[in-house]
Image: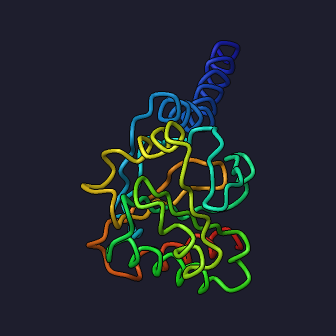
Amino acid sequence: MSTHTKPNKSGRILLIMLVLFGAPYLVAWYFFFSGTSLEVGNPSNKGNLVSPIRPLPDMAYQLHDGSLLAVDTLQDHWLMISVAAGCDELCEQALIIMQQSRRAQAVNRRHIQRLLVLTAGQERAQELADLYQGTLVITGDVAAVEHLTATFAGLEKQLQGSIYLVDPRLNVMMSYNAELPRNSLLKDMERLFKVINM
């Protein structure tokens, strides 16, 4: 009788090990490839989590000074992006929030880049670049800008004044509307770098 119980016991142990060690990989695989979002508890982030992820279009954009900006040159940076049809008060508020949030990250600010995408009012591009130094102001080309702004469609009720946080793999990760507290982006960035530097 002992000859039959030993294989059964071994089989049960093997099955338990497969469940314990294999299940997390299967669950992760499912959520990664299905695009299904997983809500766990109360999120501590201040902004709105983008799920499923949205990659930035791999294109080149014209900056206000006529030079070209290829998206792949921004890899390995956290990007703060705002889109504006002309730059009104909400747009300038977003630019100030991005500027202050980056500055507050001290040494980590070298890993952050700020972008303003102008879909109209390009005549103010140079003025805005001078006012908010370090911000890359995208003015064209039209097709590339349309592809880029389409990436943010539906994330917030309006583009004007909203801010989008893009991770170093160039996926849109969080969005912040103009109604959120001014320090929302700052708090999330501080938390991100704290986790990264642990």
Viewport quadrant of the N terminus: top right
| In the foreground, 120 or 193 | 120
* Residue drawn at 70 percent across, 14 percent down: 3
Image location of residue 20, percent across then percent down: 58, 38
* Residue drawn at 55 percent across, 82 percent down: 131
Viewport quadrant of the C terminus: bottom right
Image location of residue 70, percent across then percent down: 70, 46
Q: On the image, which quarter does residue 177 sit in?
A: bottom left
Instruction: Please give the count of numbered marks on the rendered protein.
Output: 0
| In the foreground, 7 or 103 | 103
179 shown above or below 15: below
Q: On the image, which quarter does residue 40 sit in?
A: bottom left
* Residue drawn at 47 percent across, 75 percent down: 95
| In the foreground, 157 or 2 | 157
Image location of residue 83, percent across then percent down: 43, 58
| Residue found at the very far front of the displayed protein | 123
Q: Is residue 134 left or right of residue 156?
A: right
Color scheme of the displayed model: rainbow
46 shown above or below 34: below
169 shown above or below 12: below
Q: On the image, which quarter does residue 51 sit in?
A: top left
* Residue drawn at 71 percent across, 73 percent down: 197
Q: Is residue 106 left or right of residue 80?
A: right
Image location of residue 128, percent across then percent down: 52, 74
